[in-house]
Image (cartoon, rainbow, N blue to C red):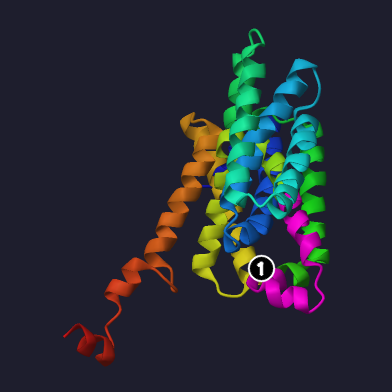
Amino acid sequence: MLDFLIEPMQFGFMQRALLVSALAATACGVVGTFVVLRGMAFLGDAIAHSALTGMAVAFLFGGSIFLGALLWAVPASLAISALSRRSGIRVDAIIGVVFAGGFAVGVIIINSLENRAGDLLGILFGNVLGASWEDALVIGILAAAVVAIVRVFYKELVFTTYDSAVAEASGVPVRLLEYMLPVLVALTTVAAIKTVGNVMVMSLLVVPSVTGTLLARRLITIMTSSVVAALIAVVAGLYLSYYFDLPTGPTIVVVSVGLLMVVVLVSPRRGFLLSWLRPKSKEQTDATV
């Protein structure tokens, strides 16, 4: 068993992959909690897909993928927030436009590049096994920035998440937070793109946090459970991809979804299996009769 755990970590690429994935998973678990509780899952998907344009432009000019994604994702997240407040257009419609437009432009740019099929697959589905120490440093900075911002504004974010009207009446800077949270989502998606790719980044942002909501009630406990679920998914996914020669990003996603399915069945709060096995109270029996 010990050899099973140690063998993959003898290779530098696996060490870097584990570090990068763990950093991304931590940021996703923290920010994903707010994304799930506030019903913003589509926002994360839109920002991730629209960032393809920035990544494609970076490829075109030989620049950094992370910088290209960041320079596109952050303005896109701010534009969504600004337009939803000032244009009168429903926010889901604006998100759909950003999603479709950014992704389409990125595909057009990538299509103009020659002999970049491998790079395209890495962008779309992740290439964490090819991560460098420089990638780990950039992702570490992004993850640390996300966690630090959430730590500083934690109380305000919690208050706004549960009742934004009361929070605003109490003097909480709700408008600032409405712009800040999409930016945090943008930073997190950029940090996770190397691990699971542009197409599936929402899964690492959302699925572990849904798992967390099934395991806990208090927000801090939900967040902790989300981070743990994300870490389990990336570690198990890396080992499975190593031993069974599977694509790493999709394997991490499958493990994450599988973990969620297990929790759905056996969760002490809402597990289907436990609810079937738990004896009915007298009131429930009378109601069914």
Q: Position of residue 175 (x, y in %)?
A: 78, 62
Q: Position of residue 259 (x, y in %)?
A: 46, 54
**Residue occupying the point 63% across, 27% down:** 123
Question: Does the magenta segment cover residue 172?
Answer: yes
Specify start and end residues of the magenta stretch as a single range: 159-184
- Is any part of residue 195 visible from this angle? no
Above or below, 55 relative to 283: above
* Nearest to the observer: residue 159 or residue 192: 159
* Nearest to the observer: residue 267 or residue 58: 58
- Is any part of residue 203 visible from this angle? yes
Q: Position of residue 216 (x, y in %)?
A: 55, 71
Secondary structure that dominates the magenta span: helix
* Nearest to the observer: residue 283 or residue 167: 167
Across the whole image, how many numbered discs are drawn on residues?
Answer: 1
Task: Report the residue marked by disc 1.
Answer: 161
Question: Does the magenta segment cover residue 236?
Answer: no
**Residue occupying the point 65% across, 34% down:** 50
Badge 1 marks a residue whose secondary structure is helix
Q: Position of residue 194 (x, y in %)?
A: 67, 34
- Residue type highlighted by circle 1: Thr
**Residue occupying the point 72% across, 55% down:** 85
Quadrant of res 187: top right
26 lies left or right of 237:
right
**Residue occupying the point 39% across, 66% down:** 266
Q: Residue lying at the far front in this picture: please name it.
A: 88
